Amino acid sequence: MAATTTRAFLVALLVVVAFLFSEGVRAAAAESAWRSVQHRREVQSLLKRINKHPVASIQSPDGDIIDCVHISRQPAFDHPLLKNHIIQMRPSMHPSGMYDESNIASIAQTWHENGECPEDTIPIRRTREEDVMRASSVRMYGKKLISMDDPLNDVTTGHEYGVAYATGDNQYFGTKMTVNVWQPTPQRGDFSLAQLWITAGSYGNKDLNTIEVGWQVYPAMYGSGSTRLFIYWTDPNTHNWWLQVGGTNLGYWPSSIFTRLATSASLVEWGGEVYSPSMTTPMGSGHFPEEGFGKACYIRTIQVVDSSNHLKSPKGVGLIAGNPNFYRVTSGVSSNIWGTYIFFGGPGKKNSKIDVI
């Protein structure tokens, strides 16, 4: 009798435990479903804010949608510092002393196969739900999470460089270069780019301002040859930093969004960068700079803008290559159209097939 009672009690207890467990599972599933719905609502809200109503849209062959947004409705004007900004339609002045390189090719983009945006609009790739879902959170989409305890290490970990920088001056008001563009194949999650940097301030003082412009090449891109990049500070009244690509002024960074760069830059750099914690992604063409023209990636006709608004060759050039066994940079000066130049790049820890574009 006692044994029967005990078994009945155990069965009842197991039933109660099973019931409580199933209730807990249902509650957890309901909470997970609610969080999923909330997350999707946040994603849709973000997409509604950043994807502005276009004047026209162009379907790119690679699957992207390019929205042609009127210049007055671009997402930049959501920033509180640009609330009352008056658009500068063209530069008020240009630096003197430019190289004449009318034969420099423009780099085409895949979506150009199906059309171009109308006048007074700017092309913006439409952000998709899957783009946002890849971020750690909706709030962090498009942002870098930086530890203020060690910000420099936080943003450079996993990054490798083959970079040259200007020496001999304390202030710079622009820079111009012609960059040779290749088509490396980054490992999954990595990137490889060729670009220029204009900076003022520092991570240590928590006042760093930086403008970075260049090519992060994807297999879907196409083109040939080299392209010219030029960033310059317009004048003492606007202080805007204009970007010129292949002889065309594309737009500018308003001085009101900067603190240190509102007056001038203290450092100018050019070269290659990869994000590859395993150092397996190639930089540039994947060839070391010593292999020279036709194999190694280069940047030539390097100039800086001085305080007199004049383009000139830098007084000197310093070099940065943290892991020269895998990525390197060299520099030189020529009396011909090459002027001051650098070769940079490397295969990383393994060779990959890379095509010039």
Image: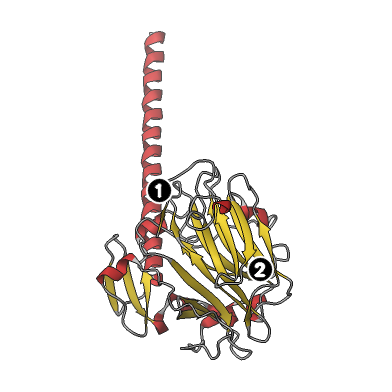
Where is residue 120 drawn, in percent x and y?
Answer: 37, 85
x then y, percent, for residue 329: 61, 56
- Extreme front residue here? 335
Query: Real-space Cα distance between discs 2 and 1?
Result: 42 Å
Q: Looking at the image, tell me whether mark 2 or mark 1 is earlier in sequence order.
A: 1
- Residue at x 49%, y 61% (from the top left corner): 139
Instruction: Write the residue at 38% across / 71% down.
Output: 124
Q: Is residue 314 above or below residue 44?
A: below
Residue 169 position in % (x across, y down): 73, 74
Q: Which mark is residue 334?
A: none
Quadrant of image for the N terminus? top left
Q: Nearer the viewer, residue 239 or 51?
A: 239
Residue 279, by quadrant, is top right
Left or right, residue 242 beside residue 120: right
Residue type indicated by callout 2 = Leu
Mark 1, secondary structure of its residue: helix
Q: Position of residue 200 (x, y in %)?
A: 67, 71
To which residue does mark 2 refer?
A: 208
What kind of colouring is applied to the model shown? secondary structure
Q: Is residue 15 above or below residue 134?
A: above
Q: In the rendered image, is residue 91 in sight? A: yes
Look at 58% across and 88% down and name the residue there: 238
Tell me if mark 2 has few (under 14), some (14-19) or many (20+) residues whose alpha carbon lies within 10 angstroms of its own.
Answer: some
Residue 38 visible at all: no
The quarter of the picture where residue 95 lies is bottom right
| Residue in the foreground of this view, choosing between 159 and 82 | 159
Classify 10 Å Cα crowding around label 1: few (below 14), some (14-19), many (20 and above): few
Q: Nearer the viewer, residue 6 or 131?
A: 131
* Number of the label disc, if any, that sits on residue 31: 1
Report the front residue among 196 and 28.
Answer: 196
